[in-house]
Amino acid sequence: MNRVPRNRFLSAAAAVGFAAAGLTVAAAPAASAAPCTDIDVSVARGTGEPGSLGIIVGQPVYDAVQNRLRPRSVSSYGVNYPADLIEPASVQRGNTDLVNHVRSQAAACPQQRFVLVGYSQGANVVDNSIGISSDGALVGGPIAATIPGDLAPRIAAIVLFGNPIRAIGRQVTGTYQGRTKDYCALGDPICQFGGTDILAHLSYGGQAGDAANFVAGKV
């Protein structure tokens, strides 16, 4: 299994986080639980992204899914975690928050189904939450919690972008494999071993429509 030169890509990830669309990084506000809509779209934003859902992937994908699934009701949840390079347990905190959200939301809304979206470090959060360890990947870490098996049928679709585990030869397998679409742009150094085009890591908003079509085919 190939290993990513960690220092090199930590620098790349920092560049992505702080150059994202030229915006100032701001801490994401704590998100409240969503109402009992038909579909809950839970989004783990990338490193350093402003906003609850993130401006590069999460918000465009959520908007596209909401439009594509009309007239069904769709709500969003922004995973509450640091999404930074400084907090050593950043991914684990996101992992725990996402699993707690799905568990509590599933209990409160028995008919609700879930779509999980993760970008960059956020993809590690989703990986861990479905039992695929991101430990050893860029801004990854060991699994802190997993979505209970009895809730697995309610996870309708998973959409990942710039997933760091791919750069170390890992991918989503098992229970969720057939419900997962994992985007890795050509040359993206965060998800492609040997990639050198950091701008590729900022390109995923252009896949929002395609991701929404994938989700629509699963719900």
Image (spheres, rainbow, N blue to C red):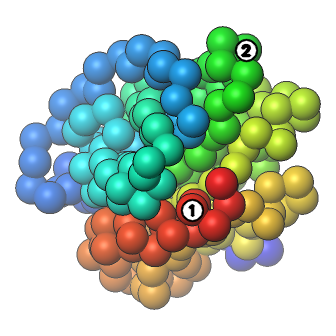
Q: Residue at x 83, y 40 (%)?
A: 152
Q: Residue at x 80, y 63 (%)?
A: 177
Q: Residue at x 63, y 67 (%)?
A: 217
Mark 1: few/some/many CA within 10 Å (<14, 14-19, 20+)? some
Judge from the rendering whether residue 111 lies leftward or rightward of residue 93; answer left or right.
Answer: right
Front one among 6 and 96? 96
Q: Is residue 1 visible?
A: yes
Which quadrant holds residue 1?
A: bottom right
Q: Are marks 1 and 2 in contact (CB under 8 Å)?
A: no
Judge from the rendering whether residue 179 lies leftward or rightward of residue 7; answer left or right.
Answer: right
Judge from the rendering whether residue 99 lies leftward or rightward of residue 80; answer left or right.
Answer: right
Q: Which residue is mark 2?
A: 107
Q: Amino acid at mark 1?
A: Ala
Front one among 25 and 119? 119
Q: Secondary structure at mark 2?
A: helix
Task: Name the spot of residue 201 as percent of width and height, x first.
Answer: 36, 70
Which quadrant holds residue 160?
A: bottom right
Q: Which residue is mark 1?
A: 216
Mark 2: few/some/many CA within 10 Å (<14, 14-19, 20+)? few
Up/down of 145 relative to 13, above or below = above
